[in-house]
Amino acid sequence: MTSLILSTATTYLLPLLLLLSVYLLLHGHDVPGGGFVGGVVAAAAFALYAIAHGVEEARRVLHTHPRTLIGLGLLTALLSGVIAFVSNEPFLKGLWTTVTLPVEWKLGTPTLFDVGVYLVVVGVTLMIIFSVAED
Amino acid sequence: MLIAVVSGFVFSLAVPLLHRTVRNVTDWLVVLLPFSLFIYFSFLTQPIAAGGVLSSSHAWAPSVGVNLSFVLDGLSLLFAILISGIGALVFLYSSGYFKGHSGLGRFYAYLLIFMASMLGLVLSDNVIALFIFWELTSLSSYLLIGFDHERSSARSAARQALLVTSVGGLALLAGLLLLGEAGGSFELSQLLREREAIRSHRFYVPIVVLIMVAAFTKSAQFPFHFWLPNAMEAPAPVSTYLHSATMVKAGIYLLARLSPVLGGARIWQGTIVVVGAITMLIGACLAIKETDIKRILAYSTVSILGVLTFLLGLGTRAAVEAAVAYLFIHALYKAGLFLVAGIIDHETGIRDVTRLSGLARIMPVTALAAAVAGLSMAGLPPLFGFIGKELLYTATLQAPLANSILTAAVLLTSALLVAVAGIVSLGPFIGRTMTLSEKHGGVPLTMTAGPVVLAGLGLLIGLLPNLVAGRIVSSAVGAVLAQPAAIKLALLHGLTVQLGLSGLTFALGVTAYLRRDALRRAVSRFDLGTALGPAKGYSLTLDGMTALARLQTRILQSGHLHIYLFIILAVTVGLVGSWLVRYYGLMRLEGWADIRFYEFLTALVIVAATIVIVRASSRLFSVVALGVVGYSMGIIYIIFGAPDLAMTQFSIDTLTVILLLLVLYRLPRYARYSTTLERLRDAAIALAVGVLVTGLTLAATAVPPISQISSYFAENSYLLAKGRNVVNVILVDFRAFDTLGEITVLAVAAIGVYSLMKLRGNGSDG
Amino acid sequence: MQTVMAFVVGALYAAGLYLMMRRSIFKLIIGLALLSHGSNLFLFLMGYLTRGGPPITPPEAVRPVAPFADPLPQALILTAIVIGFGVQAFAVVLIRRAHETLGTDDLDKMQSTDVD
């Protein structure tokens, strides 16, 4: 399945879609989006890229094996819960703090949890698509 | 008292581990627990004999009236002493019997569970707790009979004992629940006060019948007696402990415990006396027939259990006195004889009494203990057994009904049991010395201790009966009669009718012993048991049930997915559908005015694409149509305020189509396997489900929304969780634990896919 | 509109189940997909269809402005969609392997997977 239009399009689509997915992830707490949505968008971007350029190339662009993402994601989600736990709060209770970077940015354990969800969703989806496609 | 019961359970958890690490210490530790319990209960004899009752209560499930409440009165105390005392000897014996056996840790654990359950059973004041302990004894009995689980005969005997006793267990539960209903409480001490109300209650007869079934199965009464001899597949310590001294007496305990509440009526008295008497005679006859030493002892136990049952059925003061004394006596001598039988089996490997002889020279201590226990069983002075027999005759002579028939029956039974005593405790030890094939190193002390102590106690109590008369027997009799009793036991009462009967019994018994082979043949000739007996009924029932299960499995579990689905769907449509029509009737369809064109168009596209999929003859076509359905779903989500869902749906739909296209050409083409008739049938049921789901949706949404959860989330997502997107806040904050579970499931699914695709084993194993 | 959508749910269920009862394995997969669409829509309807307003608190407010859509079914469906994909992928791969190993796509002939 190599077509010039598809491969050119996906080359430019991939970074754009990834950017969108990260936006969805980070703003998901306030506008439509979140870890699940962001995750599937990113996964769809990589899947399209794999269709156009082959799984090998897609794996190279991803830089890491999907299973690493899954493990990392689960650990991140778990960690976000443990943070509350060791602060003597119920497991997974949301804790917030405000960081002032150039703009004021609220940061909390739910954000971290969402990052974990995002990583797991990307990892799972790509693991499935890649292993089916390589068959 | 809670500690006394619970300690056994707790210890049983630790024992297998302990046994693996510190083997020698464990052997002593397991003896120490029952022994200290024995000491504890022995010290309680004084206050209990003085008329005290110990009780303690711990809430368990108070809302349904179930408590761990324990009461120690004379009857419980008698049992508790037997359980802990004989328990200590049996644990000691086991360490010698199973020396070097790898499963000893497991064995100790089972035996401890049993001991704790049995103690719980006799101490419980709450009938539900009593039932639970009752079932635990059945379960531990199952594990112990099947201890040698590599033999199929042990397994089937274990299963048989479990099935028979659990039939009784179910009856017990039902009976106790009805009893609680009739008496207004689950506490025995309360029920005792409500005896008049219970006796005149309309549940009285069902209660009595159910309780009797429970007691008869547990205590191996006719026609449920067959499981006990078969349970002799168990190792000797188990036969000693469960199947002669304690567990089989749980039924007797139940009858004794409830007789102040339920006793007195004709149905209670009549049934129990008749069943007990039949069991007593049958047990004695079958004991003569057998040649396996353990089965002989088992049948004689059945016979004695019959004696105890019918004595409790009589319910007179003399009968209860005899029953309590006999229970005690029997526990002492029969446990001793079982241990002896275990020693013989262990040392010679032979259990056939016709092949055993002259063992006295090889194991003199064992032979002596056996002889003393045998004399007690035969009821000769100066042993405790003699006192028991005198009491037994006193009870039958004073029986309120049919006293001459009962006396004759007891005479016959006792004479046969004298012969049995001779066969098991004299026969193997006298005569020509056998040559044992293997080198014999003498019976270990741990194993001889039990029989010697038990036989010695039989002798001691026979000589000094008032050691136990005042302290133990009186208070137990008092508990059964529910009024104080002061009992004096004496070895000799002068020249009485009872003494004459005892003499006659012994003379008949000796004659029977001398002609035992002729007698065995005679009994065997009249044996109808194997062809028509309850054991046959049991196996027929079991076969029948297996056949039914197989038939049902073949019909329901055909291995065809479409048949499974068909059954599930048909049942769902039938049950849910009938309910829906009954409560909602045929629904009016409303809200047609509220339709907008583009919404309707989207809905139409979904339905059209669905129809295309069903009718499609090409796989590609159906994949594309599936994509159309997915995207249209996304549009629906957008229209009705769910942008998160729409985005997810669009992306996932893209991924699904990619996935299906990737595997499409590696999967076979569409083929038509079903006949038209099958397709019509499936279409009909599928359409029925569709109609049902539509109906359910309409019914569920016909009422106005009242979800408080949703409004709570909407109200608090910003205020409490600092998030404006309520859906996301639910996922990552309010219900984050659920989400954590869900992403874990996703990870598992991915690993499943990965391993199916990548890790293909060599050969056919995928 | 609720009423119309109720019929759509029924159609998705009927079609999905009909396909799952076919013996050809690819139809099973498609049927499964339709069934999960049907279930998601069913859940969605349980929250009552509300046009427009997503359950999002606008800036300078502390709670979503009514009328807004019920967030709870949305949260349930969101995870259901993603998990549904995982399940479907697993089914696809399982069937693919079964077909490869047993050499048939007739579900009725796939009975001896244990002895092979």
Image (cartoon, rainbow, N blue to C red):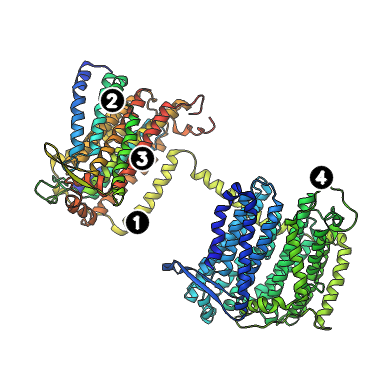
Mark 3 and mark 1 lie on one chain; the one further toward the N terminus is 1
Residue on which disc 4 sits: B438
Where, by quadrant of the figure, is residue B405 drawn?
bottom right
Marks 2,4: beta carbons within 8 A:
no
Tell me the chain of label 4.
B
Q: Nearer the viewer, residue C88 or B14?
A: B14
The tag earlier along the polypeptide, 1 or 4, is 4
Residue B149 screen position, x and y as percent: 64, 47
The answer to whether residue B534 is visible is: no
Cα gap from disc 1 to disc 2, whole angstroms: 54 Å
Using the rendered image, report if marks 1 and 4 lie on a common chain.
yes
B216 lies above or below A27: below
Disc 1 sits on a residue from what chain?
A: B
- The CA distance from mark 3 to mark 2 is 23 Å
User: Could you tell me which secondary element the residue under label 4 belongs to?
Assistant: loop
Q: Position of residue B653 (x, y in %)?
A: 26, 33
**Secondary structure at numbered mark 2:** helix
Identify residue for label 3: B745
Where's residue B602, x and y in %? 19, 38
Crowding near the residue tagged with mark 4, few <14, some 14–19, many ≥20 C-alpha atoms within 10 Å: few
Q: CA distance from mark 1 to mark 4?
A: 75 Å
